[in-house]
Amino acid sequence: MPSVDTLITRAEALLARLEAVLPLPLAAPDWSASIAFRYRRRAGGCRLEPVRHVARIRLDDLCEVGPQKERLLRNTAQFVAGHAANNVLLTGARGTGKSSLIKACLNEFAERGLRLIEVDKADLVDLPDLIDLVAERPERFVVFCDDLSFDEGEAGYKALKSILDGSVAQAGDNVLIYATSNRRHLLPEYMKENLGYTHTEDGEVHPGEVVEEKISLSERFGLWISFYPFTQAEYLAIAAQWLRGYGVPEDAIAAARQECLVWALERGSRSGRVAFQFAKDYAGRHAS
């Protein structure tokens, strides 16, 4: 029969093995290492990783989105100042500046204590732990979810819904959620769901339970900011703005107009992203 010392040694070895495979609790990063962080799941646990090279985009770099810029800037300024502010859902056409506007706001307010934490939608189930981690920090945190949408049954959907509004454990005063999406309703919608609508005698329309559930998440964002496809003139103005940023002279910008339109035609889009890509290509090819 093994001795007591032998049993203790075996028990300690077993505990060491268990500790090696159990997920580690979320630890605080070096908050001074960056103004932006990424939440990442890795083998053995989760962690916040400082972003070493934060996108340097500025508010002045973004044009043709004036109303959207003003609304997000005002909400973020309220938040940084410690006043009431809303969680924000930015929706609309792809490549129109939704994510860029959030990054520009980070750079605008970083010196006043704004920080950004990027979270993938698959990791939103850990959102309560993340909010607890930053609850006592003096900084103001924007949790950033880019290109947000959900398939049926994804766990992150209900976690985000509860944190936004409806759970006992809500986000603290120093946390807001900014999300971007190409669609207003964050779950897929199907034609058959229209059968759930009911009509009253006085003409009122009431959506069915399935449709109500799909609308309910986006309604929990207090501020909706919509983005729209750009006209040709707006697309050219955005491309010209980026070309100026690369130091291209005005006469060359005017001469590049037709080439810029062909670039958009080849890609089937006149988005701000396409304009930026053209400007990078043009400036690189004509660099002295």
Image: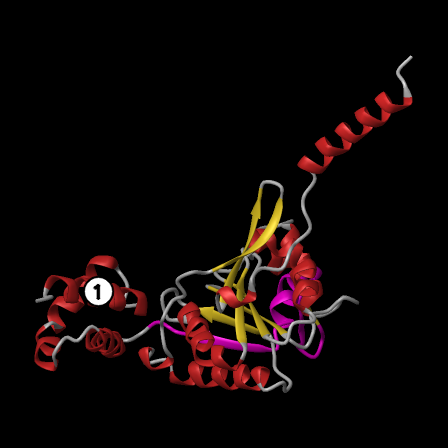
Residue at (8% x, 75% y) in the render: 255
In the image, 17: left or right of 260? right
Quadrant where the image shows the N terminus: top right
Q: Quadrant of residue 286?
A: bottom left
Compared with 235, 23 (above or below) is above
Is residue 210 visible in the rendered structure shown here?
no
Q: Position of residue 93 (x, y in %)?
A: 40, 67
- Residue type at mark 1? Lys
Is residue 176 visible in the rendered structure shown here?
yes
Q: Position of residue 94 (x, y in %)?
A: 39, 64
Q: Which residue is more in the foreground, 164 or 37? A: 37
Compared with 74, 206 (above or below) is above
Q: Position of residue 127 (x, y in %)?
A: 65, 59
Compared with 106, 20 (above or below) is above
Residue at (71% x, 37% y) in the render: 19
Residue bounds of the magenta highlight? 200-229
Q: Quadrant of residue 119?
A: bottom right
Mark 1 secondary-structure assignment: helix
Residue at (62% x, 41% y) in the render: 44
Residue at (8% x, 67% y) in the render: 288
Q: Residues within 10 Å of mark 1 (few under 14, many from 20)?
A: some
